[in-house]
């Protein structure tokens, strides 16, 4: 996260504590300079003036752990978490030497893994092989995909292309192991429907900190996101075509 989204921290952790009370892992919050007032959460302030990728890099480098479960601050949990299921995914990641195990199948994987029926392989050169959905990441792999200067959105596009350098190691679950509302805000404003939903839940949202999109604006963004997930942009299609040509030439 970063300090500009400080108003999302309380509702995020309120829902996390509610839906995952037996979480066995230490909790960290990446920030710019601020610290979150919660004894169960360790803040990682890395300084201001950095882009998303550099902030994420500095936050990761401050942790002494081979794996992290990374979630963005505007992913609000909506259902109770199967703690044993998450532990099984972590064990599988370690045994498979996985670079990533995505816990939300958006999109779903390509082929099944015999020993782990709840996991599938995300093949190289597939649409959104990796993204910023909640996932267990091998820290070294994630660091190798980050390029300073990129936003989270650019990381999803360009990092996905860079992931093709890894012939294996990318997996996803076939069903959600974390159920959440993805991106409750966009361009600094609440989605109309999310603002109504979470205001009624009384989880610590401060709606004075940012505006709320109108119903029509929310509908436009939802439609745009749905189309973007299904139909790659021309730039992405061209990049994929070039990548496929290089593969054929190599053969």
Image (tube, rainbow, N blue to C red):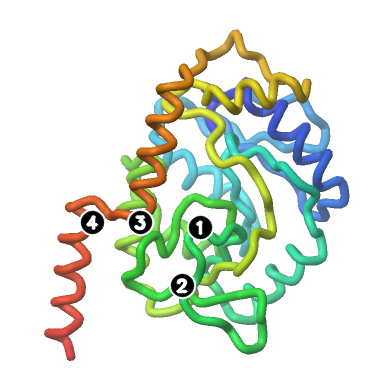
Is residue 203 something that shows in the picture? Answer: no
The CA span between labels 3 and 1 is 16 Å
Q: Which is nearer the eye, 163 or 183?
A: 183
- Mark 4 or mark 3: name the one nearer the start of the chain: 3
Crowdedness of circle 4 by 10 Å Cα count: few (<14), some, many (20+)?
Answer: some
Q: Which mark is residue 122?
A: 2
For numbered disc 1, what is the local secondary structure? loop
Q: Which mark is residue 159?
A: 3
- Mark 3 or mark 2: name the one nearer the start of the chain: 2
The CA span between labels 4 and 1 is 18 Å
Q: Quadrant of residue 33?
A: top right
The CA span between labels 4 and 3 is 12 Å
For numbered disc 2, what is the local secondary structure? loop
Farthest top residue?
Answer: 208
The answer to whether the residue labelled 2 contacts the one labelled 1, judged by CB atoms less than 8 Å apart, is no
Residue 220 point in image, percent of width and height: 38, 30
Q: Which mark is residue 236?
A: 4
- Mark 2 or mark 1: name the one nearer the start of the chain: 1
The CA span between labels 3 and 2 is 14 Å
The CA span between labels 2 and 1 is 11 Å
The CA span between labels 4 and 2 is 18 Å
- Mark 3 or mark 1: name the one nearer the start of the chain: 1
Q: Which residue, given by chain and number where applicable, does mark 1 sit on?
A: 106
Crowdedness of circle 3 by 10 Å Cα count: few (<14), some, many (20+)?
Answer: many
Residue at 35% in and 47% down:
227
């Amino acid at each position: 996260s970063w300090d500009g989204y400080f108003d999302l921290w309380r509702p995020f952790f309120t829902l996390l504590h509610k839906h995952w009370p037996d979480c066995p892992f230490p909790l960290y919050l990446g920030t710019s300079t601020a610290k979150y007032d919660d004894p169960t959460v360790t803040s990682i302030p890395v300084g201001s003036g950095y882009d998303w990728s550099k902030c994420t890099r500095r936050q990761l480098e401050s942790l002494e752990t081979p794996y992290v479960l990374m979630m963005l601050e505007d992913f609000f949990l909506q259902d109770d978490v199967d703690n044993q299921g998450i532990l099984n995914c972590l064990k599988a990641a370690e045994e498979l030497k996985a670079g990533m195990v995505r816990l939300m199948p958006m999109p779903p994987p390509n082929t099944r893994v015999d020993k782990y029926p709840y996991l599938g392989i995300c093949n190289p050169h597939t649409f959104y092989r990796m993204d910023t959905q909640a996932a267990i990441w091998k820290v070294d792999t994630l660091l190798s995909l980050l390029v300073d200067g990129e936003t989270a959105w650019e990381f999803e596009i360009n990092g996905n292309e860079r992931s093709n350098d890894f012939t294996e190691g990318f997996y996803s679950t076939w069903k959600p192991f974390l159920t959440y509302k993805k991106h409750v805000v966009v361009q600094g404003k609440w989605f109309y429907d999310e603002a109504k939903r979470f205001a009624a839940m009384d989880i610590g949202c401060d709606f004075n900190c940012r505006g709320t999109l109108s119903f029509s604006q929310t509908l436009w963004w939802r439609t745009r996101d749905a189309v973007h997930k299904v139909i790659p942009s021309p730039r992405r299609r061209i990049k994929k075509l070039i990548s496929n040509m290089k593969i054929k030439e190599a053969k």
